[in-house]
Structure formats: C-alpha cells, structure tokens
Amino acid sequence: NFYYITMLRDPVSRYLSEWKHVQRGATWKTALHMCDGRSPTQDELPTCYSGDDWSGVTLKDFMNCPSNLANNRQVRMLADLSLVGCYNLSSMNESQRNDILLSSAMSNLKNMAFYGLTEFQRKTQYLFERTFSLRFISAFTQINSTRAANVDLSEAVRRRIEELNFLDVQLYEYAKDLFLQRFQYTRQREHQEVRLKRREERRWLREQREQGRPWPSKHKGRVFEKETENDLPTTTEDYTSQVVRW
C-alpha cells in the first residue's frame, strides 16, 4: 500500500526560504506542472525572469512577479487544480477559484494518512510513530536558526508576504488546529491504554492471590504501585511556536 504524507511550514518562513533558494540559483525547469494531461502554456504561466535562472533576485522583485509559483505554493500543491481549470485563470473569477482551491487543499490534507508541521518536530515524530507503529532511532531536532529566520523584515513587508500567501495562511491555521487536536487525542488514548493495562495487571494479581497460586517467575519481586500522571508515557515537548513575528 502507498500512503500520502506531507509536511507543512509556516507560510512566511516557507516563502522566505524559497526566495533565498531561488536567489542562490535554484530553478524548477524540470517541473512539468501537469494538470488534466498537459502542461500550462507560456501565456497561462509566464516566467518571472529571463536567462538561465533568477540568481541574486531581491525580495521586492520576487514578490512583484504575479505569476510567481512561490505564492500560495502549499495550497496549490495540495489542491486538485483540475477543479479550477488548472492554470487557466480565465475559467472562473478569482474569488471562486481561491475558495475551491483552499477547500480542496484542506480536504486532501485531512484525508492524507499523515502530515506534520515543521514548527512542531517532536509532536510530528510522536504522531508519525504512533500512526505507522514505527520508532525512529533518534529524536527529531527542532532547528530554529534557518535562513528564513535570519531575514530582517519590516512589518510592512511581512504583511505583504502574508497577503501574497493568504490561502497558505488559512491552510496553515487549519492544519495546525487539526494537528494539535490529533496530538492531544493520541496522547489521551495512549494514557487510557496504559491505565487499562495496569488495571488488568492488578486484577490478575488479585485473582492469583485469592486462588493461592504462586506468582510466575516474571512477576516475582515486582512491585505494583498506584499509577500517577508522571508514570504515563511522555514525549519531549518542542517549542510552542518557532515562528518569529518580525
């Protein structure tokens, strides 16, 4: 079986990271952007630069390109583009197109086998391990010193990036809320399973005592104490948010 999984990132940080990546010479020339069996035409998806790449592009120029695929990239990559005529922007009005894209992205994300959030590495690891019954050999690391975090932004520029990525902002808020709900539910269910297991152990021991049977060797010398909240499985908490508000 194949399972679809993905990772989401805070939209402003993700946008800045892509800008820095493009600034260093990265391109997506090999990406076909296939939709409904064809790639977009030059008119449907004009390039933002001439030449081999967009090396050295300023953040202002990066933001000013209306066809920049960095804008709302997370929504576009999760949504079913065929619902809005792929890259043909004339197939419907912008408001209707945005509503359909966001709704499709949310639905597809919710129905994935798993998704995580870059800003919550330990919680992502915890949910992944319990979703697929796997264990990583080392703990995920929360790295805050990223290229995006080191960009000095004015409040006006930050707001402009949020405007350009307003669909991603809405998707991320939805994703974060659902992610934390799933985390809390999984923790509570695990706690209940531990309590039930200990309750069954104590019940079994009482039956053995009442029947006068000796304890099996695996239980000899074992002390069963009253469970406390500190006895329950825990996971190392990560930062509540690494997103810097510039």
Image (spheres, helix red, strand yellow):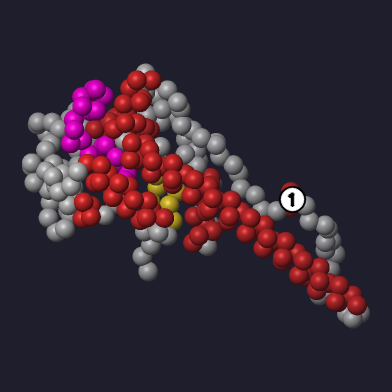
Residue designated by label 1: 229
Choose top left, top right, bottom left or bottom right for residue 168.
Answer: top left
The mark total stands at: 1
Q: Is residue 75 left or right of residue 178?
A: left
- Residue 209 versus residue 77: which sits nearer the camera? 77
What residue do we see at 66% from left, 53% from top? Answer: 233
SS category of the residue bearing label 1 = helix
Residue 94 percent location from the top left of the image: 22, 41
Neighbor class of circle 1 (other Cα within 10 Å; few <14, some 14-19, many 20+) is few
Q: Position of residue 52 (x, y in %)?
A: 11, 34
Quadrant location of the N terminus in the rendered image: bottom left
Q: Position of residue 45 (x, y in %)?
A: 13, 41
**Residue at image location 8% in from the left, 41% down from the top:** 43
* Quadrant holding the C terminus: top left
Q: From where the camera sits, is residue 187 visible? A: yes
Q: Amino acid at mark 1?
A: Glu
Q: Is residue 227 magenta?
A: no
Relative horizontal placement of residue 20, taking residue 38 as reference (left or right): right
Residue at left offset 45%, top offset 26%: 245
Q: Is residue 33 above or below residue 219?
A: above
Which region is colored magenta?
57-77
Residue 164 lies in what quarter of the image? top left
Q: Nearer the viewer, residue 179 or 135?
A: 179
Q: Residue at x 55, y 36 (%)?
A: 239
The answer to whether residue 214 is seen in the rendering is no
